[in-house]
Each structure stands twice: as C-alpha cells, then as structure tokens.
Image (cartoon, rainbow, N blue to C red):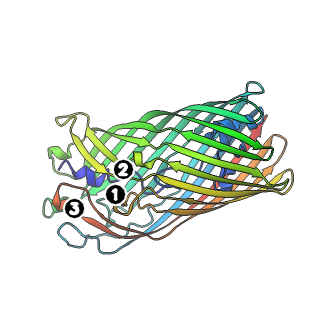
Amino acid sequence: MMRILALVLLTGLAIEAQAAGFALNEQSTSGLGNSFAGGAASAEDASSQFFNPASMTYLPDSQIVVAVHAIRPSANFSNNGSRSAASTLTPGGDGGDPGAWAFVPNIYYTKALNETIRLGLSINAPFGLKTDYEKDWVGRYQGIKSDLSTLNINPSVAFKLNDRLSWGLGVSAMQARAELTSAINLGALIPGASDGAVQIKGDDWGFGWNTGMIFQLTEDTRLGLAYRSKVHQTLEGNVNFGNVPPLLAFADSKASAKITMPDTFSASVFHRLNKQWDVMADATWTNWSSFQDLTAIRTNGVLSGSIIASTPHNWQDTMRYAFGATYHYDEKLKFRTGVSYDETPVGNRMRTARIPDNDRISMSFGVSYRYSANSTFDLGYSHLFLRETSINKRNDTDIPALADTLTGHYNTRFDSLSLQYVYTF
C-alpha cells in the first residue's frame, strides 16, 4: 500500500507551464513582445535584471517596473482505450479543460550608487502551474489537481568595469508551495469499494545565485551571457487521505519531498540596425536533467523515515531559441515581435497526466508607449503552438492491481497577455 502515493501524487510535479517543464518565461512584458529574444543583452528596462544583472549598468539612475501576466493554458484530452491492470476499460470522462487562468506578477527596482555601480531588486515567480481535471475523469488515478507557485526575491549588484564590459551578480531566496490531489482506485484492492482520495501540500524556501556579463562589441552590438543556479528545496507538509479504510498505509501524516529547480545558461545578442530597427537573438540551456526523480518520505508517526514513493522522471536538458525585432515608430512608440522554439524535457515514456509536455513554438507581439518623461506602458501578447501530444503511461507501482494505463492524446494551446508600467526617476 505504501507505493500508492507513487501513483496518485508523485508521478509528476506539473502538467504544463508557459515554458517547457514547469518554468515560467513571463518575467517581463517588454521581453514577452520579443519572445524573450536577446534577454541577456537587451537591457530594455529594470525587468532585464532577471535575465542578466549586468544589464542594470545600461539603465537610468532609478527605475521601478511593475507587471502582471495573465496566462491561459487550455488542454483537451481524448481517451483511446485507457485500461485497468485487469485489462478492463477505465470508466470516466475526458476531464474537461484542466487549464485555468493564472495571474503572475513581477516587480523590479534599480538604483544607481554612482556612475559605475547599480543596485537592483527582483520579486517574481520563475516556476509555476495551475491545472484541475474533473474529479471523475479517466485519468483521476494519475492526477486531478496540480498547483505549484513560487516567490523569488533576488537582490543584485552590477558594475560597469569599462566602456566595453559590465558584470552583475545576484542572490535569491525562493519559496515554493505545492498542492497535488488524485483519486485512489480502492475497487482494485477491495471489490466494490468506491474511490478514495489523497492530497499532499508542502512548502519550503531555497537559495540560489545568478550572474552575467555584457560585452559591448561595437557601438550598436551587445553580447550578453548569463547564468542562474539551481535551487534545492525540501517541501515539508502533510499527506491526507479521504474515504479510505483505517489502514496504516493510509494514515494521515507529515511528509517531505526534495525537488531541484534547474539552472540555466543564456547567450544573447542585441544589434541596432538603424534608428528604426533593433534585432535580437537568444539561446538558453536549461539543466532539466537535474530533475531525475521525486521521492517522498514520512516525517512522523510509526513509519517515520520510510519512503512513501520514489518516482523516476529522467528528464533531459533542453534548448530554447528565440529571434525578435523592435521597430521604433517615433520617440514615444515602439512595436515588437518575436518567435521562439522551446524543447520539452519530457521523453515519450515519461509523459504523464501531470506532464503532457511537448516541444512548442511561440509567436509574440508587443507595443511600448512612453506617456511622459517618467512613465512608459508596455503591452505584450504571446500564443504558443503545440502539436498533438500522445500519452500511453502505465503507473510506476509495485502493486500489480493498481498498474492502470492511461492512453490517449492531448491538444493544447497557451495564450499570455501582459501589461507593464515603467517609472523612471
């Protein structure tokens, strides 16, 4: 019975985020308009410090950026003969649309100490998801609700070393909160029994760092390099069961699970073609292979210290490529566009109901209007295209009676709309 949580809770941490895996790209509205192309080199406003702290040396003395991103994932699952371990068809619907609106805020601040040193502060959410299937859907034993949110507080400092080179360094404190729910197929263990339910909640703080450099290659061309470290966290919380027999394996208890937020490395180029046009490009590597498994243990009670579940993921490292352009209509108005290709870390054998991920292409558009000498407004929109994603996932369990298989395919789309206000003083 102890392996049940491997099926119902820990087969995956996320279903889909706007970026591959469970990462969130939405950290800047001005960046969104260009599909985040050139993020480590553009130095557009104070939000650029998240992508490269060295960018602060290119900004005005003091600046505040406040943004909110409305993200709407939408997914439709089509069942294609999902079966129980006894080879009978699993009853249930297709789950409805598990996607839901999510609102992701950001705030950034930069301040010049002198001509060569800048201080900055970022408050944002680098990772997250929010999905919720109908409770009686055919894949309920592999996941119903997945809710992950993060809060990242990231002070940083940047130095203009000379006219050609800037360097920045930051540290971050990240809080993660997670809630995962699923059904338990008690009828496969106790004939005639109705489904049970299980919920896990947990949270933790973790710490990391980031650094970056910008090389001014020519008057019109910049190269940016940036690295953001892993953040190791141990989510501490509770496991709670509902509608289950009073067996030791189903006893409510405290539990913990370790997770690693991956490190990333970006190389970006920004080039001013003329007074009207800027072009930019970006390549970002994400170390998703650091997310190999998720193991939960009980932390109190008779079984304290025992492994609840250890679920393999075996994710792969990924690359993201982006290209963008900005058109300066006049001194007040800019138009942006961009395209990106983002690889999935999830192989076909590791795709689950919580992570029906696939490679994706995004198209983005944006507009920036300088209302006054101090105030600028940015609006951005992005649409992600994913091809049809198949799933044929057998639960990872040592209990043969619970080894059901979810078979079908997903049609998924994402839309992001962002609004940002920049105040310079």
Pointer 1 local density, CA inside 10 Å: few below 14, some 14–19, many at least 20: many
Tag 3 residue: 403
Q: Position of residue 223 (x, y in %)?
A: 68, 45
Residue type at mark 2 is: Leu
313 vs 101, left or right, is left
Say if 301 sits above or below 406 in the image.
above
Q: Quadrant of residue 252?
A: top left
Closer to us: mark 1 or mark 3?
3
Farthest bottom residue?
80
Q: Residues within 10 Å of mark 2 (few under 14, many from 20)?
A: many
Residue under pointer 1: 143
Q: Is residue 176 above or below residue 196?
A: above
Tell which circle, 1 or 3, labels the residue nearer the N-terminal end.
1
Residue 91 point in image, percent of width and height: 27, 70
Instruction: Looking at the image, tell me whether mark 2 or mark 3 is earlier in sequence order.
Output: 2
* Mark 2 or 1, nearer chain start: 1
Q: Would you place residue 42 above or below residue 75 in this image? A: above
In the rendered view of the protein, which quadrant contains the C terminus? top right
Q: Secondary structure at mark 3?
A: loop
Q: Are marks 2 and 1 in contact (CB under 8 Å)?
A: yes
Q: Is residue 93 left or right of residue 113?
A: left
Crowding at dot 3, Cα within 10 Å, few <14 / some 14-19 / many 20+, comes out as many
C-alpha separation, residue under disc 2 versus residue under disc 1: 8 Å
Give me the C-alpha separation between circle 1 and circle 3: 14 Å
Residue under circle 2?
180
Tell me if residue 301 comes above or below residue 333 in the rendering.
above
Q: CA distance from mark 2 to mark 3?
A: 20 Å
What SS does tag 2 mark?
strand
The amino acid sitting under disc 1 is Gly
The x and y percentages for residue 329 are: 84, 57
Residue in the image at 41% along x and 41% along y: 260
